[in-house]
Each structure stands twice: as C-alpha cells, then as structure tokens.
Image: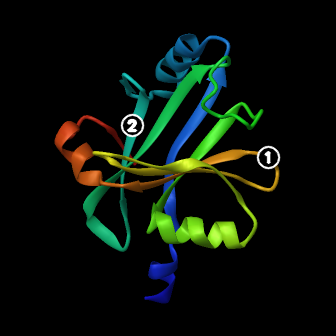
Amino acid sequence: MADELKGRVTGIGGIFIKSDEPENLKKWYVENLGLKENPYGSLFEFRSPGDPIHRKYLQWSTMPTSSNYFAPSEASFMVNYRVENIEALLDSLVKAGAEIIGKVESYEYGKFAHVMDPDGNKIELWEPIDEVFDEANPTDSTTF
C-alpha cells in the first residue's frame, strides 16, 4: 500500500518520434510493420496480468522535427509512462532533484506531467482514465 501512495510507473503509455516527414514515417510503419493507423498514429491495446479484465492503451505517434513538444529536450523521441498517483510521484521526483516541466494538466482521459531525466530527455507521465479510450475504441485498436 505504501508504494501505491508514493506513486509509481505501471507501464508504457506512449512512444513519440520526431521526423522531418512524420506522415511518411507513419505511413512506412503502417505499410511495412502493420500498425493500424488512427489520427494520432497507432493505438495499441493491452491487458495487464494483474488486471486482465480492463483494457489499457499505448499510443505510438510521429510528429514534425520542428515540434516544441519535447522541449527543452533535444532528443528525437519521448516516452510516456503510465503512472499511479501522479502528484505523489512528482513529489518524490522533486525530492530526488528531478526537474519538473510545467504543471500537471488534466483532460477527460487522464492527468499529464513532464519531467527531465538525468540525461536531458523529457519524459511524459500519464495517469490514465482508460474507460474514455474503451468508449472511443470498442475493438478497433491493435491488440498485443
């Protein structure tokens, strides 16, 4: 129970890749690796061994090299981590000396925050509300 109150990563929520030609890169992945396309890239559905009833999701997306979404990181990718108790996790990260970028943002599908890792990579933390995705994606996402 203490670990849950502290906040923790529960999985990967998304992978984001910058490209000079993001639509062409997305098309390549769709045509050559079989990703099922959605407006944001490709949505993957999965189930956790500890909770096989509820569906969970991972979003794979491309974006233009010119995007500032990864700033201040200069990396060409960003990983989104699914988390429990985002506020407690952020408190722990601040105490550990991590740089928090901006404030927690809330949307109908969850809460988001951004943190810089020790190598200067911006990471995204997401406390999801998977039921919103369940309603929007009855069975049309890529399952793994």
- The spot of residue 108 in percent (x, y) is 28, 45
Residue kind at label 2, given as amino acid type: Leu
Callouts 1 and 2 close, C-beta under 8 Å? no
Q: Nearer the viewer, mark 1 or mark 2?
A: 1
Dot 1 alpha-carbon crowd within 10 angstroms: few under 14, some 14 to 19, many 20 or more = some
Residue kind at label 1, given as amino acid type: Gly
Q: Residue at x 62, y 73 (%)?
A: 92
Give the residue at mark 2.
43
Q: Secondary structure at mark 2?
A: strand
* Residue 138 visible to the viewer: no
Point out the tag, 1 or 2, that comes first from the N-terminus. 2
- The spot of residue 95 in percent (x, y) is 69, 73
Give the residue at mark 1.
120
Q: Residue at x 37, y 53 (%)?
A: 46
- What's the distance in space between the residues labelled 1 and 2, CA to CA? 27 Å
- The spot of residue 13 in percent (x, y) is 47, 49
- The spot of residue 57 in percent (x, y) is 37, 48
Q: Is residue 2 above or below residue 105?
A: below
Which quarter of the figure is the N terminus placed in?
bottom left
Q: Residue at x 57, y 22 (%)?
A: 63
Q: Is residue 98 above or below residue 108?
A: below
Q: Judge from the rendering whether residue 90 lies leftward or rightward of residue 66; answer left or right.
A: left
